Image (spheres, rainbow, N blue to C red):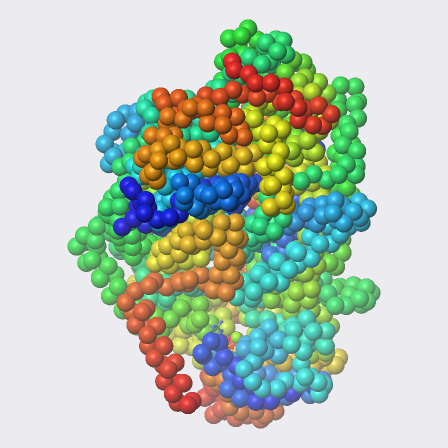
Amino acid sequence: MFIQQLVNGVSIGGIYALMATGYALIYSLLGFSNWAHGDVAMLGAYIGFLCVATVRMPFWLSALTALLGAGVISILNERLAYRRIRRNNAPTMFLMIAAMGLSVTFQNMVIVFLGPKFRTYPPVIPVKAISLGSIKIGVLDIFSMAFVIIAMSLLELLITKTKFGLAIRAASSNMITASLMGINIDFYITLVFLLAGSFAGAGGVLLGLKYTVYPQMGNVSLKAFIASVFGGLGSVRGAIVGAFIIGIMEVFVSGFITSGLRDLFTFGLLIAILLIKPSGLFGIDIQDKA
Amino acid sequence: GSNQAKEDVIKIGYVGALSGDTAVWGQAGLNGMKLTAKEINEKGGILGKKVEVIGLDGRGNPVDSVNAFNKLVDEEKVIAVIGTNFSSCNIAMAPIADQKKIPLIGTACSNPKVTVDENGKLHPYSFRIGFIDPFQGKVLATFATKELKAKTAAIITDIGSDYSTGLTEFFIKQFEQNGGKVLIKVDAHSGDNDFRAQLSKIAPLNPDVVLVPWIYKDVALIANQARELGIKATLLGGDGWDSKELLSMAGPALEGCYYTSQPSFANPATKPYAEAYKKEFGINPETEALFGHDGLYWIKDALERAGKVDPTALKDALENTKDFKGLMGSITVDPATHNPTKPCSVYQIKSSQFEYVGDFTP
Amino acid sequence: MKEILKIDNLTKKFGGVCAIDNFSVTLEEGTVHGLIGPNGAGKTTIFNTITGIYKPTSGIIEFMGKDITNKKPYQVAQEGIGRTFQNIRLFSQLSVLENVFIAGHLDADYDLFAAILRLSKFGKKEKYLRENCIELLKILGLYDRMNEKAGSLPYGHQRKLEIARALALRPKLLLLDEPAAGMNRDESKELVEFINELKEKFKLTILMVEHHMDVVMSICRRITVLNFGKTIAEGTPKEIQTNKLVREAYLGGEDVAC
Amino acid sequence: MSGYVEGVIILIGINIIAVLGVSILTGFTRLFSFGNAGFMAIGAYTSAILTTKFNMPFIISLLGGMFVAALISLALGKLTLGLKGDYFLITTLGFGECTRVLIEFLDPITGGARGYAGIPQKTTLFIVLISVVLAITVARNLLNSKYGRNLKAIREQEIAADAVGIDTARFKQLSFTVSAVYAGWAGALFAHYYMFITPVMFNLDKSSELTITVVIGGLGSLTGSIIATTVLTLLPEVLRSVANYRMLFYGIAVVLIITLRPNGLMGYKELSASWIKNLLLQIRRMFRCRKEVA
Amino acid sequence: MLKIDNLHAAYGGIKALRGVSIEVKPGECVAVLGANGAGKSTLLKIISAIMKPVSGSITFYDRKIPSFPYQVVQSGIVHVPEGRQIFPNLTVYENLMVGAFLRNDKNGINRDLEWVYTLFPRLKERQHQYGGLLSGGEQQMLAISRGLMAHPKLLLLDEPSLGLAPIIVNQIFEILKEINKSGTAILIVEQNAYKALSVADRGYIMSTGVIEKSGTSKELLSDEKLLKAYLGD
Ligand SMILES: Nc1ncnc2c1ncn2[C@@H]1O[C@H](COP(=O)(O)OP(=O)(O)OP(=O)(O)O)[C@@H](O)[C@H]1O
Ligand SMILES: Nc1ncnc2c1ncn2[C@@H]1O[C@H](COP(=O)(O)OP(=O)(O)OP(=O)(O)O)[C@@H](O)[C@H]1O
Ligand SMILES: [Mg+2]
Ligand SMILES: [Mg+2]
């Protein structure tokens, strides 16, 4: 049972991780919680669904379209809302509120134009589970886990080892000065939103395959937010670790104590960690030097 | 009051979730009513007057629903309101319906407190079409022990839902009274989508039946995940299962499982209505559409019995309903509780179709 | 003369970096004491340690005979130590007057109920405080701009406002971190006169970090020179100017005239 | 006045009280909270239980709700007020969710997810109006005293606030507790108006609605908060009949206001006689310019 | 190479520049002097395009200056801004690498890195420390070094001596002389007029948004009255 629950936890954590990555990426650059991230994932899931079920494209092409589509939507968010707020030099809280507004807008846009129905992907990938002794592992879980690990490793390399990474870290620290050093801020921000949006799209498609597609499915991104705080805001690695901590924690509390108190334990652990490490497990805290 | 006896339209309100995460039901209910109103008007209306349906959004939220109810009564001057499918919304609206003396007919809201308050006092203006949790819980438990010969049961409950917790409570009571044993009750939250942590606890206990008192979207997920984890037990559920969507979402995983509901789209009598609905709106109807249909006809029936368009007269006529025949079965109102007494239908899923098994009373 | 601040064997380490290394100094009441040294010598760190922003690794800080070593920043301020910041830290969205007003909060000794119920005590204290603040702004020459946002003042005025804010606290000891930074000679000169005036008027003791030698040499009674967190010299301006170590480590070949 | 209109006015009043609490916390101290609905829940349930189970008079229940909210804010603040920015925010979010989950879990006392019914209707339009006036006066007096100035100092520059002798921890706590008391107050009024409460009424959506309102009104403007509350409570009512487009328009409105008004509706300013006078002057000047051009 | 003609600028309603015209010729070092709030920093901000002018023209090598900061850097102008503006959560080394962002010559970058480390050994000692934890003066050294890492054709410096110890100030001006000799043009804003004019070929004196006076350094330094009036004795 313990091992089965661990498997369950890792599987849920994987989904959270996928959502948390894009979320952390944007946080690291613009310093705000993009509450619309989950809804971009939701739109990605719908795009993929419509491609597969209505247009009858092959799955791989549909998934790709979903990734790109979500990326483009994410860029549009930045272009139409966030960029203007950034230019106004408004506090970062404004970005977060705008994201919340976008989240409400997207969810209801789907309800109005596509209907509030629940939808399921046709079985393009086997949903079967393999048994290892008494342990059952979903094929889809293995597939999504592999995707998560590969995508994360590439991203980690991108951020720590390339000029792209240096540019976004510099920009996140001080945009005006970064542009004074020759960094094309708008370009890199667009790139980051594309990347984050595509991650969200991938997450959306995976969520759709595993569960169902519906307008509120993006609300899991709240877990991504919590995961990022666990790991240290803005740290992609931290967000991933945090995602798995939450996934496993939730499953263990649900499995061994009671689901009714699940959130209590999750937040209890969160506060406990923050009391010891005020900026999360991997967050760097540059003290405000007087 | 006699809001509008003189006007030549009869305005009936509908409160339901027209936006937000539960809009599936609210929109279906309103559509259903509009379709029905059209039908009634084509056949000459009620007491020679045309029916007009006014739907307002209550978001499935008690506060919004109360505001919507107030607006329907105070601004739109409706003489009765149908809705909602959420007990929480109706419990909040019931005292106001009493204050304003406007009948309120709940649809799938199943908490006893919708019509009878904390202290057992009747809300005179509050009615409902669907049945109450204790009733459905009892039927399910009795069906499990008597028909399925189940000795052991497990339950997975949506702890955030009054519907799910209510059904669970009364199922346990009856199941144990019938000599069965509830091996485990696990909690989960809707919106979680992944129930494997909870189901993994059920799997090794091998219960005969598993009660899944959820809404069909979650039922589909729970069923699929339960099978994935090797749970072979028969799954049981209530009227939350009642949607064609369930078949495509979980078909094989639910093969041979049962649920209780009102007579609904699995009932051949509803076929013409379902087709008309599909023709009009281009989508399959949800059960809430049938509630809208029956609610409106019920009001027609009562008004015609009362012989005049007046909310209080309507209330009295509703209270004295005997054997009103709707698409969801016949309704006879118990004047002490305003709950309809009607049999509960049991359906089975067989080769990915709903199959009517029979009517049961506990 | 009475000693007002006494720092004894103060050490502050950041990981491997020893920013202050066994530093000791004694300030006499009513004097201006200079603290100079190369960049990164540990001067700002000493300020931050005195004011409780950093906890010292070891050592004792005594203020008017009282041990304030491990006090919190606000407690140190309430004891009577005001300071300005090397990187200006004004309440930039608030008006000039509000900046000073805030710092005077200790003078407004009414309680929450008096404030909410607008008791007469509240009105009196507020009026008194407001007059004091305006007085202070007049002295500093900021009266004309008192309703402007602090953040939109030119650099030099911002530095003055920082001083005004520190004074509104009615401190006995004032710590100034590079008050003349970004000022030209003329402005520096004005500043020197101005600080001298303030010192008399408010009976202040001042500890000042500054890289403008003309300012330091003309105003300080004594100067401590720091390098790598250690004192390398202490004495009168004359002594410091001629000190070989100081010239090598800090002044370079420069000839500084007083 | 129709019952509907009265109901909407009461709802606006209750929302104003809750939003003022968030305004003090977020607009004037720059502490972001996504848990104030949790304090509302505490106020609502405490007062409801006091009224129904202990037969307390309404005023005692009301004060009881506020008091318990204050106590809990003290305990929570002790733990979390040291955290910065979004880290603090997430703990308040967690608090809000945990409150809801706990109320669901403590079924025998709170009625769980099925809600708590049978609360007598004690909140009247008159009581709400008095409460709103009181809430505004207290908030205004508080903010226009050294307490409010100290909060603003913390908002602007915490280190400098420390350096002028402001016990930042104490004042943050003050702000947090005042905001909790306001939320508890609103919650108690709410419970005794709608007569029925369920945990979902006080979920994350409610908390974020409060914060959205404050930001849209302008961080640092009480009148802005009041105007925004009125607008945002009325907006869905006006849109109620467009049914399924309702929340879509609401979402779009939020995005538009936040992108087009860089400082919210009111910025840091308060609506006052002189503000209006300035506005009129500006308009007049505009007219003059036109004339000159013409 | 840089030519500014009749430049106007404003913050909201406040006019900061009112018709400023200056010029920097290839290989020249030019100083802009003036009291607090004269508009010197504003001038540099406009050149590097982080602020938009109200009117006026700026050309670089006879071409209109681009409208985005990164394009300005691409064209060879680097601005070392007022108030250090280092990246607090990047290490010293990373800060320097951002300075060299547009360069692709690995060897050249490494050579320049060694060079700034020899200029400021302090930075080498602290190379893995976060920029935000440096002392004020160390940050200033880092800001200047970061600008040098870009290897610009024209270097804009806003009060480079701010907060630096006298010995370092002297050193900085020696360095500026050196890089100017090796062909980099410099436009420097300074409070320390004498120091600035000792390296500059020419100077402009600004007050409240207008150029009051210009001339070669020698001329300006010999004009006692002028120095007294605008720069304090
Ligand atoms: N929080 C910190 N963490 C790590 N190192 C620090 C920290 N604060 C200061 N330092 C280091 O301690 C040394 C002393 O810094 P400090 O700011 O006291 O110098 P300073 O004498 O004020 O210099 P300047 O004249 O340049 O302002 C510096 O080398 C700095 O890098
Ligand atoms: N962000 C701003 N908002 C409003 N006014 C500003 C702003 N920045 C500068 N100013 C005003 O513009 C004018 C010119 O400022 P600028 O910073 O260019 O002066 P400066 O010559 O660099 O002065 P300093 O020697 O103090 O750095 C000043 O009057 C200043 O008050
Ligand atoms: Mg310093
Ligand atoms: Mg400047």
Work out whether C113 lies above or below C226. above
- At x 54% / y 82%, what residue is drawn? E54
Q: Which one is in front, B300 or B138?
A: B300
**Is residue A15 among what the camera can see?**
no
Q: In which quarter of the view is residue B12 placed?
A: top left
Can you give x and y, in whole percent of width and height, for residue D194 in the image?
35, 38
**Quadrant of the drawing holding the N terminus of chain C:** bottom left
- At x 44% / y 71%, what residue is drawn? C152
- At x 76% / y 45%, what residue is drawn? A52
Q: Which one is in front, B77 or E211?
A: B77
Is A89 placed left or right of D182 in the picture? right
Q: Which one is in front, B272 or C213?
A: B272
**Is residue D1 among what the camera can see?**
yes
Number of marks present in the image shown = 0
Can you give x and y, in whole percent of width and height, for residue D142 in the image?
29, 52
Q: In which quarter of the view is residue E169 placed?
A: bottom right
Q: Which one is in front, A50 or D134?
A: A50
> Residue extending furthest left?
C120
Can you give x and y, in whole percent of width and height, for residue A40 in the image?
64, 50
- At x 34% / y 70%, what residue is drawn? C147
Is D231 placed left or right of A46 in the picture? left
Can you give x and y, in whole percent of width and height, for residue A258 in the image?
55, 23
